[in-house]
Amino acid sequence: MEKQREQWGSRIGFIFAAAGSAIGLGNIWRFPTEVGRNGGGAFVLLYLLIIFAIGIPVMISELSVGRKGQKNIVGSFTSIKNTPLWHVVGFMGVLAGFIILSFYSVIAGWGVSYIFKFLNGTFTGGLSGSEVEAVFAGLSGNAIQPLFWHLVFMAMTTYIVVKGIGNGIEKYSKLLMPALFGLLFILAIRAVTLDGAMEGVIWFLKPDFTEIGIKTIFGALGQVFFSLSLGMGAILTYGSYLGKKENIPSNAMLISFADLSIAILAGLIIIPAVFAFGLEPNAGPALIFITLPAVFGAMPLGNLFGGLFFILLTIAALTSSISLLEVVVAYFIDELKWDRKKSAILAGIAIFVLGIPSSLSQGLWSGISIFGMDFLDLADSFTAKILLPLGGLMTVIFVGWVWGGKNALEHIRQEGVKFKLGGIWINLVKYVMPFVLLYILISGFLN
Ligand code: PFF
């Protein structure tokens, strides 16, 4: 007899886990970095538009395929349509999970090391922007230290995934989210009231339409996919543990709103702080590791808040990294018939090794440039801007044309579940999104 597939303990457990996957370094590290690189408010505006026009519809599609297929990404696609193409598409998602987690863990590792830097007083006394920059350069430029923290983070991720979904993922997510939100809120108030911060607030919120071009659109699209964990089967896999009575569209909205609000809060901390401390908004991946300590340095009990913040950031990153590893592990378990422990440990080791060049690219290997990017930026851009939107494109084609719009809608509406905008959704999925995604992908790539 088939073993009954694990399911979420409760609706709220699923929401927390899926929101936990979405909310992570993508919101707090990557979003402000991309806003800073892409001209501020115009990027934020595009980001908002794309969440509603593309992000939420793709999330509904992924959750539906996962719940219908009841398997990992490859198994879910192929249980609906078993052809080589859908094996390849599913496998692309597993590959994306592999690559994303490899650099994600390096960044998260920096965050873990910052917990200790705060607690042992490295940033005491309100360092200047350039002094904080030097502290960060000392860490990321070192060959061994960041690898150690990368290892620590991968070990934690692997440990939780070995433990399985129910008692691992749900439990951690429930505690974290409210705490993270509260602390971000306090920090945002501190940041926007710093001397000289207003200029940053305006830069963040007021779109400069001359900044809108294919580069910004391409960047915003990639950020939406990355931040909402779309295009590689993470949300799909979580959907596979979802019960039949759950309302997929309203869950998708809720998760996306939670994700968006954390990103906006993070932006309202980092960008004003950049202006207040006279730093450059386009500093790239280092941005939060330089601005945040400066903000904490300028507040009472800064070390304590700083330590707490990086603890919360680490947990937020963990609830995302476990969803990345889960995609790979669910694939190994279902398709290769390995057990969970073996799958998680082997994948964890391979991903650790793949992360080494990303880590070294911030110091020892910073001279090496591929397509004008260092290795970390390359891994990040290749996945967020190409693999994930491509996965999203294939998912909407799958739902609209292979599984079939009518069948998908029926699946979502089973057991009397309401989906008022279903007609709009399916038309978007079938007739609009394939062309829009293809257009952005091709023109962004050629750019
Ligand atoms: N959404 C996560 C974040 O914003 O940090 C990162 C991520 C997780 C991307 C899972 C993709 C994914 F499948």
Image (cartoon, grey):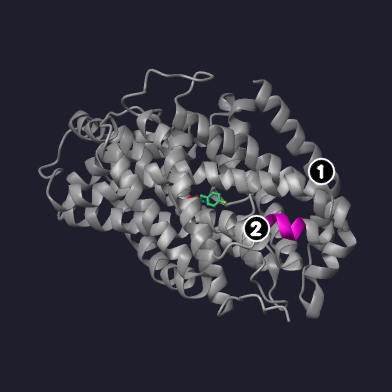
Identify which residue is drawn at 78% across, 49% down. Answer: 86
Q: Is mark 1 within 8 Å of ligand 1?
A: no
Residue at the left extreme, as displayed = 125
Residue type at the position of mark 1? Val
Quadrant occupied by the C terminus: top right
Considering only vertical position in the picture, is 376 above or below 81?
A: above
Per the image, the residue denoted by label 1 is 432
Q: Position of residue 378 (x, y in %)?
A: 51, 29
**What is the span of residues highlighted in magenta in the rendered image?**
73-77
Considering only vertical position in the picture, is 199 above or below 342?
A: above
Identify which residue is drawn at 24% across, 52% down. Answer: 115
Q: Position of residue 427 (x, y in %)?
A: 85, 52
Q: Is mark 2 within 8 Å of ligand 1?
A: no
Is residue 220 toward the left or the right of residue 33 in the image?
right
- In front: 359, or 254? 359
Residue type at the position of mark 2? Leu
Is residue 43 toward the left or the right of residue 356 in the image?
right
Proximity of marks 2 and 1: CB atoms separated by less than 8 Å: no
Identify which residue is drawn at 85% across, 52% down. Answer: 400
* Label 2 environment density (alpha carbons within 10 Å; few <14, some 14–19, many ≥20): few
Query: Which label belongs to residue 336?
Result: 2
Quadrant occupied by the N terminus: bottom right
Badge 2 marks a residue whose secondary structure is helix
- Label 2 – label 1 distance at C-alpha: 37 Å
